[in-house]
Image (cartoon, rainbow, N blue to C red):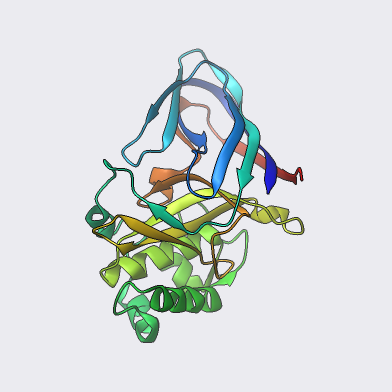
Amino acid sequence: MHLKIRHRTEYRYETPVRYSIQELRLTPSDVAGQKIDKWKVSTPIKASSSQDTFGNLCSVFVQEASYTSMMIEAEGEVHTQDAFEFIDAPKAVSPYYLLQQTNLTEPTAEMLEFFSATLPKKNSIDEVMGLAAAVQNSILYFPGQTNFATTAAQSFAMKSGVCQDHAHIMLGLCRASGIPARYVSGYFFAENSPNLASHAWIDFCADIDKGLWTSIDITNACFTDARHVRLAIGRDYYSAAPVKGVRSGGGGEELSASISITLLN
């Protein structure tokens, strides 16, 4: 596929923001299954760029002049093809680090008991896919009930959530089973479901020695394919979030985000 992506994020504040730091992971990399044709991230002031611990392309900008609204826009074109296996770069974070739970992924005893019949005994594709299917069947996809701070335990208690919640529950269960797993943020092309454009899924480590990861989309119960565009990886949403920041002042915040994905051929 040849996809054109436009991602706009706009913040409005009740009172002027005096100071803020924004951290962006809005630039996809050339990896298996995707080649970036062109890409541009527009920010209110010039951002500095670097690679984070996980190898994600990261931009940071600091605003010291007061403002009441802010626009961040990412736009570009990506060529994609089916791919669901990824090999770590030589200096990648150890898979063992991705056995650690976070506040967002920590499973409760009730979760572990509920999924006990499908918890993988080993990191085989069949067993992990079986668990993914169980999570998808048990946690109803229901937008609007959860947000970026919702934990796996909270989503499980409601038996509902969105792709981010599916990913956090899956991460918690994989890690509890001794299988390294990481969060993936990205885009998903679905002509009839534009609400899925901003998406999240997981990689689990199929071979620790080789640094081989297999990518599974829990929400769609499939391996990743040409519809998926990877943005960033991390331990959970917080470390792979496309946009996050801290601010002083501003009062109440109104956030609006829109993503359009167009098939060019």
Q: Position of residue 50 (x, y in %)?
A: 38, 27
The residue drawn where x is 35% and y is 35% is 52
Does 52 appear above or below 194?
above
The one nearer the camera, 171 or 127, is 127
Residue 226 vs residue 93: left or right? right
- Does residue 103 appear in this view? no
The one nearer the camera, 118 or 32, is 32
Q: Position of residue 10 (x, y in %)?
A: 63, 32
Residue 255 vs residue 18: left or right? right
The one nearer the camera, 8 or 226, is 226
The residue drawn where x is 65% and y is 51% is 197
Using the rendered view, name the quadrant where residue 259 is placed. top right
Using the rendered view, name the quadrant where residue 117 is placed. bottom left
Q: Position of residue 104 (x, y in %)?
A: 37, 57
Does 196 appear above or below 20?
below
Q: Pick out the residue farthest to the top.
A: 65
Q: Position of residue 202 (x, y in %)?
A: 44, 59
The residue drawn where x is 53% and y is 73% is 136
Q: Pick out the residue farthest to the bottom.
A: 117
Quadrant location, the C terminus: top right
- Does residue 102 appear in this view? yes
Does 191 appear above or below 66?
below
Numbered label tally = 0
Residue 85 vs residue 89: left or right? right
